[in-house]
Image (cartoon, grey):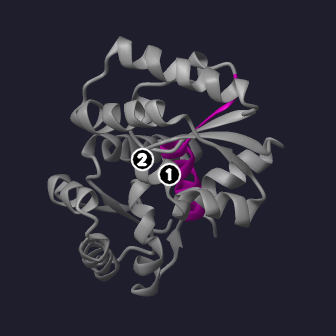
Amino acid sequence: MKTIGLIGGMSWESSAEYYRLINEAVREKLGGLHSAKCILYSVDFAAIEMMQQQGRWEEAAQALITAAHSLEQAGADFLILCTNTMHKVAEAIQKNIHIPFMHIADATAQKIREQGLQRVGLLGTRFTMEEDFYKNRLVEGYDLEVIIPEVQSRRLVNQVIYDELCLGVIRAESKAHFVRIVNQLVQKGAEGVILGCTEIGLLLLPEDCQVPVFDTTRIHALRAVDYALQE
């Protein structure tokens, strides 16, 4: 079994889900008392979030490169970054380590392609929805068509992520808003919806939506387990 290195804490609410999902999957696949070999480096999200808002992306990248180096030196065989937004600096991390890096957008796109879909809605932070670092990877690498919400809906999604979900706050009113936004994406032609923030799966469940839901946290975690258990 390979040792999984996890860069987490962005937020720790979703990092805890990663840990649970990874260990449950290993137990399911291997049985008995088996659990995952993994190392978690959890950053202080307040510092990272401030860098995001101030556009200090090079500084944020360096903080995550430091985390990646620590995991590599500690014996991780490959790395996963437990956040969608900070994949904005994924290339910088990859260039500074000597072990594989499993990109969350790749794992998600591959899952979408397995289901034969092409047009997908994308929910996430404003960075993930509005900038190209994530969408372009889906479009150029996997020939997907990505649809994002209207401006007001994007603002609402971003606000709920930072002000509620990252703090462990789950509100029925926010879920209703997210369901409405998903329905609008479906009306625009979305055949499925990417939960492109690792906290959204804490609020929005597959049964809440009329189209397939691609929970990036679950997809990423389970893909990591598959790779860790490969001979």
Q: Secondary structure at mark 2?
A: helix
> Residue 40, percent across and down?
29, 60
> In the drawing, does residue 211 fall left or right of residue 49?
right
Look at 63% across and 62% down and name the residue there: 136
Look at mark 2 in the image and give the residue it sits on.
126
Look at 15% across and 59% down and name the residue there: 47
Q: Quadrant of the C terminus?
A: bottom right
Question: Would you place residue 36 above or below residue 184 in this image?
Answer: below
Local packing at callout 1 (Cα closer than 10 Å; few below 14, some 14-19, many 20+) is: some
Res 36 seen here: no
Look at 38% across and 61% down and name the residue there: 86
Real-space Cα distance between discs 2 and 1?
6 Å
> Residue 126, percent across and down?
42, 47
Question: In the image shown, does 185 or 150 lie closer to the viewer?
Answer: 150
Would you say the residues marked 2 and 1 are in contact, meaning their CB atoms lie under 8 Å apart? yes
Identify the magenta region: 211-229
Look at 29% across and 82% down and name the residue there: 73
Which label sits on residue 103? none
Question: In the image shown, does 84 or 181 lie closer to the viewer?
Answer: 181
Q: Quadrant of residue 132?
A: bottom right
Verify whether residue 220 appears in magenta: yes
Res 178 seen here: yes
> Residue 22, percent across and down?
45, 48
Q: Secondary structure at mark 1?
A: helix
Q: Amino acid at mark 2?
A: Arg
> Residue 97, percent across and down?
41, 85
Question: Would you place residue 217 above or below residue 205 in this image?
Answer: below
Q: Residue furthest right?
A: 116
Question: In the image shown, does 60 or 35 lie closer to the viewer?
Answer: 60
Q: Quadrant of residue 51?
A: bottom left
Q: Amino acid at mark 1?
A: Glu
Look at mark 1 in the image and give the residue it sits on.
130
